[in-house]
Image (tube, helix red, strand yellow):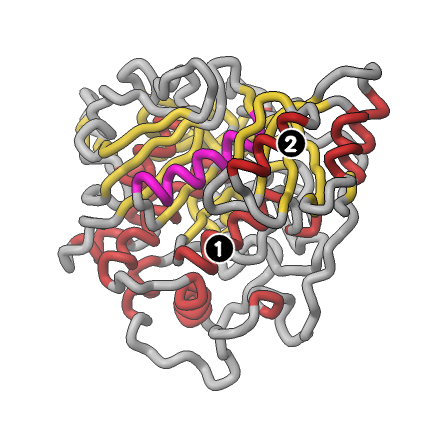
Amino acid sequence: MGQIDRRLDSVFTQVKTNVAVPITVEVREVTAAMIRELGTMGLSGARGHTIFPYIHGKATEAVARAIAANPAVIRVSYDEPVYTRATGPFEVVHFKEKTIVPLSESVSEMGAPALWDQGLTGKGVRIGVIDTGVNQSHRMVSGGLRGVYSAVPNEDVEDIHSHGTWCCGAAAGRPVTLPDGRSLMGVAPGADLFALKALSREGSGQMSWVMDCMEYAVTKFGCQILSMSLGSLFDNGGMDPISRAVNHLVQNYGMICVIAAGNSYVPVSIGSPGGAILALTVGAFALHVPGKFHPSTFSSKGPTTALVVKPDVSAPGGNVVSSDVAELILGPAAHEEYAIMAGTSMATPQVAGCMALLKQARPKLSRADIEQLMFIASMPKIKDTLLGFGPIRVDKMYQALDQPAPAFMDLEVALSSLQVIPYYPLTLIPRPESQETQEIRLPAVIG
């Protein structure tokens, strides 16, 4: 017999009786018979996964409680709404004084050109970008685009928000030269790119759509790396359905899931699924404003509510110093254009590109290997809750590929001990889900 989670309980108190809301049902096994059974119980539009133990649909409170009483059901959760941005500091802002950093400069600061010189461009590595879709004909992304998919009902994959196109270009964009002479290129310009749309033209969606994209990327496209510049305002102890889906992909499919930390700027503000213990969670730093490697003011800070040290690493994401002053990164946009943006959203696909370079060099590269490489490359710095292991240097990580791990650092360990606060053997403690309103966003500021 399952249970209704606290978040869904809270939602039911806020809607009228007999109003159906989107839910996620965790079951012991997803089968066609189980989907039909839940459908006959009143779950409308029931659909299930092949690699995750979840069935999604809409249900009234009475139906949801009846489903929770089914012996085959473990838990019934709210299928959270997903948005391209949250309110307040996540709104589009127009700055008077802007320092514009082209992607080429950002990429160089991470050491990617040193790997290109070794013939490592991400060739043969498949990156899936789950976002607002992609401008398929954009000259920076069209050359590497190998497949597209939309989980948004009745919508194609075309991007009108620019956010998804920007992230695709940052991860695996082909080189272009702008009329003013500036050059743009993604971190892994030889990688195969797959764009998966989880957000609608209105900029909203459901968390289940994100999980649909995750599954499609693995089972249909064979992606090895996922870039997700999205997340909730709460990490839910890293135990909500999508966080567990991330852990499942990493542990059982060898995936590298690169996820934005968020733009909530205060401590203990990592969102979900960035709070998943096996996510490669990315913070952001600036290159010029107010100085090089200065943590971005908006970048969410750890630890998670389960006391896991996050973010894991950081990359250039621009900065917002005031309502008038900002550093923004120039990349591709919708409608064959280019846009300047800032956010952990911008840092995330760049780290995904770095992982593609390393994956080409070491095809069996695992999440534990990455933790070890980040540790060695950042020494003597230790991982903290501001920038993780610090500004990513993929060239140093590459040099560390054949170096032995420090004697005290055995990374082939149980999931519960990976990434915990240094020197303290803490166990992952699930936090009760918040009853406050949660929003999922693609954290970015557009200049």
| 214 is higher (above) or lower (below) than 12 | below
Q: Give the range drawn in magenta.
A: 206-221
Q: Does the magenta stretch include residue 48?
A: no
Q: Position of residue 44 (x, y in %)?
A: 62, 21
The mark nearer the N terminus, 1 or 2, is 2
| Residue 217 coordinates in the image, percent (x, y) | 37, 40
Q: Where is residue 109 in the image (x, y as percent from the top left)?
A: 33, 50
Vertical order, 425 against 320 (above or below): below
Q: Can residue 85 be seen in this view?
A: yes
Amino acid tagged 1: Val
Q: Is residue 94 left or right of residue 26?
A: left
Q: Looking at the image, which residue is at 44% across and 43% down? A: 348
- Of all residues, the one furthest to the bottom in this rendering is 407
Q: Residue 114 location in percent, x, y?
A: 22, 57
Residue 427, relative to residue 336: is it above or below? Answer: below
Quarter of image, res 92:
top right
Q: Is residue 208 magenta?
A: yes
Please tell me whether the stretch drawn in magenta is mainly helix, strand or loop: helix
The quadrant holding residue 347 is top left
Task: Say which residue label 2 marks.
Answer: 38
Q: Residues within 10 Å of mark 1 (few under 14, many from 20)?
A: many
Q: Which mark is residue 313?
A: 1
Q: Give 247 or 353, whichever is nearer the viewer.
A: 247
Element marked by disc 1: strand
Seen at 65% across and 53% down, the residue is 302
**Numbered-mark total:** 2
Q: Which of marks 1 and 2 is in front?
A: 2
Q: From the viewer's perspective, is residue 351 above or below residue 94?
A: below
Query: Is residue 173 toward the left or the right of residue 431 in the image?
Result: left
